[in-house]
Amino acid sequence: MGSINLYQIEEVKRRSFVQEIKKEYKKIGNTKTISQQVDNIDIVFSLTLYLARPQKIKDLSWNWLLTEFDTLESKSRILPKAVLLVEKHDSIYAITFGHSYFMVDKFCDRDFGFNFARKLKYKEVKTTTLISPHSRRNKTINSYLYYEELEFDSGESYAKLKAKADLPDDFITFKPTLEFGNSIKFSIENDSLDKIVCLIIYVEKTLRTQEDLHRIPVFSIIKDTDLLNQLNIQLSSNIRQNPAQINVAELDIIGATEIFNRNDYEFTIKYEGKEKAVSALNYDEIETFCNEHGFDIAEILLDISVVSYQDGSVCRTDKIKNLIDYTNDSSRCLLSKGQWYKYNNDYMQYLVESLSGIKVLYNPKYDFLSEHYDAFIAEKYLSEKGNKEYQGKSKDEIITALKRKYYAEKSFNLIREMHDGFQNFDRYTQRIGSAEIEPMDLYKDRTMFAVKIGSTSAKLCYVIDQSLTSLKMYKRGQLKIHNNEIIDMVALWLILERKKHLKLKNGMPDINDLDMLMLKNRIDQWKKEVLLSGLKPCIYINYCSKAKD
């Protein structure tokens, strides 16, 4: 029984795909033709085999170990790879063997696999791979026993599905267990080219005639050229401002195969003739490479090349842009494997419903206006101007120094402590093992608060990491609170730098009115972790006018 990994090539990429395969692979034998009648029409299929051009035999990456034991170094043969090209008048399919899926995946129709998956009935779901953008669990693989439901939660999108289809007893085109991603992986008996043609005919007929049986949220590919140009310009601009915001995916789904960017894989980072071999691909390694060779990471990051190896064999060579995950907040778009996607309606609807279930509070007396900050700094000036550190300085110099010392968030927390009965933990750290951890910002009425002032997702998302760290410490019994008080509620306190208030829904600020998709995705995941801990999530919303300099 053979495994068939079937791709459909995207229409606009067919020409470039054929050019690429002829460049990198060698045609084997003659093209074969098979004619089949479909709906009383004779359809001719052309099948061509391409085999990868020979590569040099490579040294084993662990030859150093053999040397230590006085053994001659060894070399490894490159595993062969091939592509079977299947062409008909209106489409091109590719079937991959070996590691050729790395090359083919770049040209495929990424909706093909799940479009087919939506139309089948299933007896059993075996594994799912779900993407949760900006969650600390960015991609999650779930394995099931005797489970029939296609299960997902808000903020999640399918990257891969492995399931057992409910097929008629006399069905012989393929075996019931299927894998779906950018490609579809089938198992067939009695391998032959005729079987492959029959398989493609069945898939096309199913896509053409069957209704969808399942809702499977996935990201929709963006094809608008103007929008793509705009997104790429914004990506370059944002990375120049903050290159550390990129995330190199630990797990990729190539076709219907899980690829972990570690384990048995090795990498070479390359730019302008310089290169560095690394065993793990992440931002720290890329930054080290740039520092070693004097490159400005903010300027060259997207143009760095990465060669991936498995067992000494080159699997793929890609630009960093094709290996990172990145979200454009304002356009609600996601960059994954070099392709821009739009969050589809299913995804957005589940996210809206989930966020609507979080308690949101607004009390105008907690708004942090510039006059509040100025009054606080004036108080500090009167009480601290005589301190030794300010001797010989003018009033303006002291005020400037005080604003550095009492920055906005610290001032906000101190004001809440002085006037509103909160315990202030800002900049108070506890030692957990060898690390110094800030347990929380504020505490009151059995509620822990993480406070952040800002106007963008990038800035406000920090408060979620802080809150989850505090939650974990509390659940482990490591969080020290006055009189060992119990915590019932975990709260994010977002002080928004904006003049226009959020719309109200049932008398509460509507979090869904925020134009910050990255933040909302992170809040959604935060909510789930708080609930799983047996506590209640809550969000406080207030507004801030920027302090005067």
Image: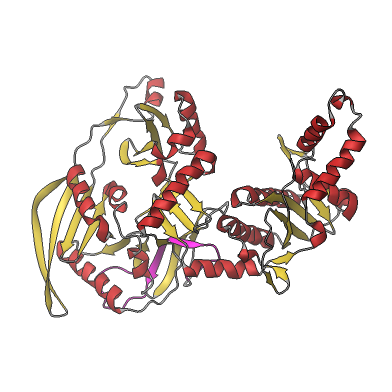
| Magenta region includes residue 354 | no
**Residue lying at 37% horizontally and 62% vertically, measured from the top left:** 180
User: Residue 2, can we see it?
Assistant: no
The part of the chain drawn in magenta is 150-176
Could you tell me residue 95's position as x and y percent?
A: 24, 57
Work out whether 81 lies above or below 58: below
Could you tell me residue 327's position as x and y percent?
A: 50, 53
**Residue lying at 60% horizontally and 56% vertically, measured from the top left:** 519
Which one is nearer the viewer's eye here, 103 or 95? 103
Could you tell me residue 197's position as x and y percent?
A: 18, 66
Which one is nearer the viewer's eye here, 12 or 480? 12
Q: Quadrant of the C terminus?
A: top right
Q: Please indicate whether residue 264 sits to the left or right of residue 474 in the image.
A: left
Task: Please tell me in which quadrant of the rendered image residue 36 appears.
Answer: bottom left
Q: Please indicate whether residue 190 sits to the left or right of residue 142 in the image.
A: left
Q: Please indicate whether residue 72 sits to the left or right of residue 489 in the image.
A: left
Q: Please indicate whether residue 209 sits to the left or right of residue 544 in the image.
A: left
Residue sitting farthest toward the top: 70
Work out whether 473 lies above or below 177: above
**Residue lying at 58% horizontally and 51% vertically, measured from the top left:** 136
Work out whether 473 lies above or below 182: above
Task: Please tell me in which quadrant of the rendered image residue 270 appears.
Answer: top left
Q: Examine the residues drawn in magenta and state their main secondary structure.
A: loop
User: Residue 36, can we see it?
Assistant: yes
Q: Quadrant of the N terminus?
A: bottom left
